[in-house]
Amino acid sequence: MPAPEIERLVGLFARLPTLGPRSARRAVLSLLDNPKAQMQPMIETMQAVVDHVQICPICGNFDTQSPCSVCADLKRDKKQVCVVRDIADLWALERGNIFHGVYHILGGVLSAIDGVGPDDLHLDSLVGRVQKGNIEEVILALPATVDGQTTAHYVADRLEKYPVKLTTLARGVPVGGELDYLDDGTLQMALKSRRSL
Amino acid sequence: MPAPEIERLVGLFARLPTLGPRSARRAVLSLLDNPKAQMQPMIETMQAVVDHVQICPICGNFDTQSPCSVCADLKRDKKQVCVVRDIADLWALERGNIFHGVYHILGGVLSAIDGVGPDDLHLDSLVGRVQKGNIEEVILALPATVDGQTTAHYVADRLEKYPVKLTTLARGVPVGGELDYLDDGTLQMALKSRRSL
């Protein structure tokens, strides 16, 4: 029987992924420990995000500038486009600071179970970017799941007729991986794609 | 490399209990799916909480009214005071709708490891409430942990000289509990506190 405002806030938190009613209560209680010092910055930051964050019209990334800081970066190689499922995957690649091209966010992967068809993905905009002819390589960095690979094949089919190099992420033993603990599929791919030392 | 506002918001979420950097990113990304529809209500609710929620001067509960709705409720038995560790435990008891007295929030339990001493708990205010003489029973609903029980004994010592009945929650087999899966301590307490049918 918390105050209605608190109850409503717990309800809003409980809707977030990875949080349930119990962890939402704990999160809100920790915010309540010092509402002014903890909630006020959150309120202001959220307001700044709502007011300024927009979707990049080129790649679909979120940023306060448009085009986004990746697409606007002159040092980035615009000839390499890395196709990712969502922004979380873009962030994962950016955290590694390993890719210096630009991105294209599909907004999901094809999934019969979840009812995601080609029209639900940002495919036409990808084809449009490739059609313009300035792109040399499209890297399909989609999840190594059945849905992810189905999507990769679909995207490859759509781009087949354009003079663009299509690549995908390597499969193999992850760094630090013990062979004993790896699944058969990964081991098989790692053996098949073996390279000379 | 998300926009600085987004990064700050992820950082604020990651500080909440039960959330880490990864789940904070997922939570923020889900909010970004539709910032206006998802974040605006959260901003407004948080602002309402910051503006209106206060600590009840009697029991230490959070509420938009002062004294809190429990302490102000005329139907509640003010002669029964249930001592709980924190507001989460108060909410747990209130969810069950099983207790019709009032509460006193200690704000923690004694803990040598965490450096929580008697002065860190709201003990003086509890003694003050008991001293006023209108209280018949103090129910110590503290966690069944070593720290919780140490605290219960300490509170009992402090209240010993007042003409008040001190009780604690029953120990035993939880409803739906399989004997086979219970720890020895619980089984022992359940056997010791057995009652006639």
Image: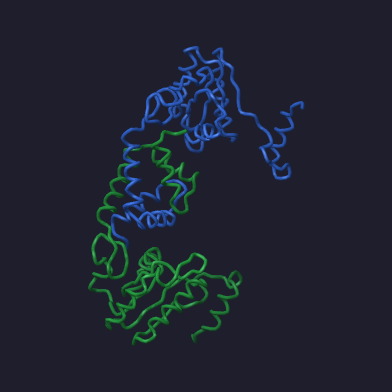
Chain colours: A blue, B green
A157 versus A61 height, above or below = above
Q: Is residue B35 left or right of residue A133?
A: left
Quadrant for the C terminus of chain A in the image: top right
Q: Position of residue B34 (x, y in %)?
A: 36, 37
Residue A163 pos. (x, y %): 56, 12
Q: Residue at x 57, y 70 (%)?
A: B178
Asked if residue B4 lies left or right of residue B37, the reply is right
**Viewer-side residue, A189 vs A53:** A53
Please indicate whether residue A164 sits to the left or right of residue B67 in the image: right
- Give how far across and how far down residue B102 sits, in percent: 31, 73
- From the viewer's perspective, is residue B126 above or below residue B50? below
Q: Quadrant of the N terminus of chain A?
A: bottom left
Nearest to the observer: residue B66 or residue B128:
B128
Count of numbered circles on the image: 0
Can residue A110 be seen from the camera position used here?
no
Question: Quarter of the image holding residue B31?
Answer: top left
Q: Residue at x 67, y 38 (%)?
A: A175
Q: Nearer the viewer, residue B188 or B165?
A: B165
Which residue is outermost to the right? A197
Please, is residue B192 above or below residue A134 in the view?
Answer: below
Front residue of B192 and A197: A197
- Residue B181 seen in the figure: yes
On the image, the x and y values in percent for residue A190 come to 71, 33
Which residue is found at the position 31% from the left and 49% from the top?
A: B46
Tell me the quarter of the picture where residue A67 sits.
Answer: top left
